[in-house]
Image (cartoon, rainbow, N blue to C red):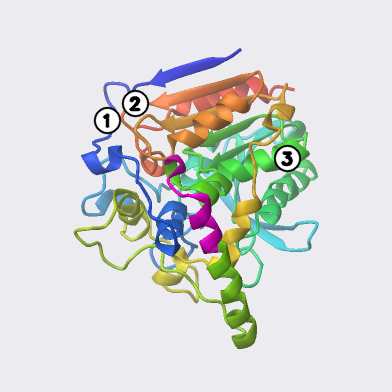
């Protein structure tokens, strides 16, 4: 049944405090600057600032919300590093999270968790994976190909088809592990992974229940900007620049990376960039892979980024029915248009949950705002054999 729900935190939870800038939708100028701020939302992981099993460093981060806990570490679960191959023979790294009290009878419900675009499993995904495992689910937080600990060269490559394939490969792994029931596998995509999970689910009926949190349609935002603020002429100019840059990269053998997030904020930093910066460039969410630098964790090549122009995850989303879809987003999130669009195009059963007072990044790690009971109930109901 269609359901649109407003979720308000309970009395013990801290409501989000959004300044006027975060409430406003960004009006992007065209060109590289627009692409940089509109597609921001990530950083590869594992290393200096905490990776899998890191302490709750975000709680001590200056200026971070009191309930932000990106590096949450549960004492009720077991975390095992695993790898498995996609059909492209690329090794995907993941953290398999199991409840310590799990009955290992092959009947468990499983949820594959995908990280925000350009991020890694230690940013948001592992917090979700552990919190849901505490509720009895087997969870698998993965690094998408070309990110984090997964294989793929060059690093930080944009490859939507391979991202979607990673979710199907995760089903392959879980369905042959002997740990879970093959008819009880679902997926949770955060930010850009929401679109990649939907893309995978349209092709792979083994994904029985699909949920997204703070979803970004990376195709739409690259083509049109937020709130359709980018014109067709601006898009064409961006594509022309990327095409010309390919010659330079081919001749030099080196990719030219864009600087999505600055090292420091300035007085004229736009609200969307500021929101991502406060997560990815502070102890609240910093996670750096071995051999990388903080600056490298966020950046992607323009020549790679424009692949998103041909990415349409919501086309034919209705074909997922009768498998259920759950969309969760903050009601003041700059990205709320993507959950609204997906919900409007999806067929039954579907549900849209608005989290009162939450912005886009708030639902990455603010454990007091995230509607855990709704996620638990959704997957518990729809992953019943």
Query: What residue is pinned by disc 3?
Result: 179
Q: Secondary structure at mark 2?
A: loop
Query: Which quadrant of the rendered structure holds the N terminus?
Result: top right
- Magenta residues? 227-238
Give whichever of discs 2 and 1 has the lower sequence position.
Answer: 1
Give whichever of discs 1 and 3 has the lower sequence position.
Answer: 1
Question: Do callouts 2 and 3 mark residues in contact (Cβ within 8 Å)?
Answer: no
Q: Which residue occupies 48% across, 49% down?
A: 231
Question: Do callouts 2 and 1 mark residues in contact (Cβ within 8 Å)?
Answer: yes
Please say whether residue 228 is one of the residues in the magenta stretch.
yes
Query: What residue is pinned by disc 2?
Result: 356
- Is 76 placed above or below 115 here? above
Q: Which residue occupies 32% across, 43% down?
A: 68
Q: Is residue 167 left or right of residue 225?
A: right
Q: CA distance from mark 1 to mark 3?
A: 38 Å
Question: Residue 132: x and y, percent?
Answer: 52, 35
Disc nearest the viewer among 2 and 3: 2
Q: CA distance from mark 2 to mark 3?
A: 37 Å
- Is 26 placed above or below 254 here? above
Question: Residue 334: x and y, percent?
Answer: 38, 40
Query: What residue is pinned by disc 1?
Result: 15
Q: Secondary structure at mark 1?
A: loop
What is the number of the mark on residue 149?
A: none
Question: Residue 348: x and y, percent?
Answer: 66, 18
Give whichever of discs 2 and 3 has the lower sequence position.
Answer: 3
Disc nearest the viewer among 2 and 1: 2
Q: Is residue 20 left or right of residue 292?
A: left
> Could you say which is closer to the camera, residue 192 or residue 9?
192
Q: CA distance from mark 2 to mark 1?
A: 8 Å
Q: Secondary structure at mark 3?
A: loop
């Amino acid at each position: 049944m269609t359901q649109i729900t407003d979720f308000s935190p309970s009395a013990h939870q801290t409501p989000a405090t959004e300044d006027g800038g975060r409430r406003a939708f960004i009006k992007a100028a065209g060109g590289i600057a627009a692409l940089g701020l509109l597609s921001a939302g990530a950083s590869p992981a594992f290393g200096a600032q905490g990776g899998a099993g890191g302490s709750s460093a975000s709680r001590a981060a200056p200026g971070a919300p009191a309930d932000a806990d990106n590096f949450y570490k549960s004492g009720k679960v077991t975390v095992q590093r695993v790898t498995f191959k996609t059909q492209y023979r690329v090794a995907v790294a993941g953290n398999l999270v199991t409840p310590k009290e799990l009955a290992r009878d092959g009947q468990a419900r499983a949820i594959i968790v995908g990280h925000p675009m350009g991020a890694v499993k230690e940013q948001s995904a592992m917090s979700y994976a552990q919190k849901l495992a505490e509720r009895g689910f087997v969870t698998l937080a993965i690094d998408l190909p070309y990110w984090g600990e997964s294989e793929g060269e060059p690093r930080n490559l944009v490859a939507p088809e391979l991202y979607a394939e990673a979710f199907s490969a995760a089903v392959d792994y879980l369905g042959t592990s002997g740990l879970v029931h093959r008819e009880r596998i679902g997926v949770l995509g955060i930010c850009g992974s929401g679109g990649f999970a939907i893309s995978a689910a349209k092709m792979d009926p083994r994904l029985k229940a699909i949920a997204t949190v703070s979803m970004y349609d990376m195709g739409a935002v690259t083509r049109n900007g937020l709130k359709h603020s980018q014109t067709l002429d601006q898009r064409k100019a961006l594509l022309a620049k990327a095409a010309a840059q390919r010659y330079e990269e081919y001749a030099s053998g080196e990719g030219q990376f864009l600087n999505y997030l600055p090292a420091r904020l300035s007085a004229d930093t736009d609200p969307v960039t500021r929101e991502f910066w406060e997560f990815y460039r502070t102890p609240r969410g910093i996670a750096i892979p071995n051999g990388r630098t903080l600056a490298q964790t966020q950046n992607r090549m323009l020549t790679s980024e424009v692949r998103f122009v041909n990415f349409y995850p919501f086309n034919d989303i209705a074909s997922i029915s009768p498998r259920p879809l759950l969309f969760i987003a903050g009601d003041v999130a700059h990205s709320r248009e993507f959950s609204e669009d997906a919900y409007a195009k999806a067929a039954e059963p579907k549900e849209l949950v608005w989290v009162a007072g939450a912005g886009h990044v708030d639902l990455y790690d603010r454990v007091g705002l995230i509607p855990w009971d709704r996620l638990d109930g959704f997957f518990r109901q729809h992953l019943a054999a």
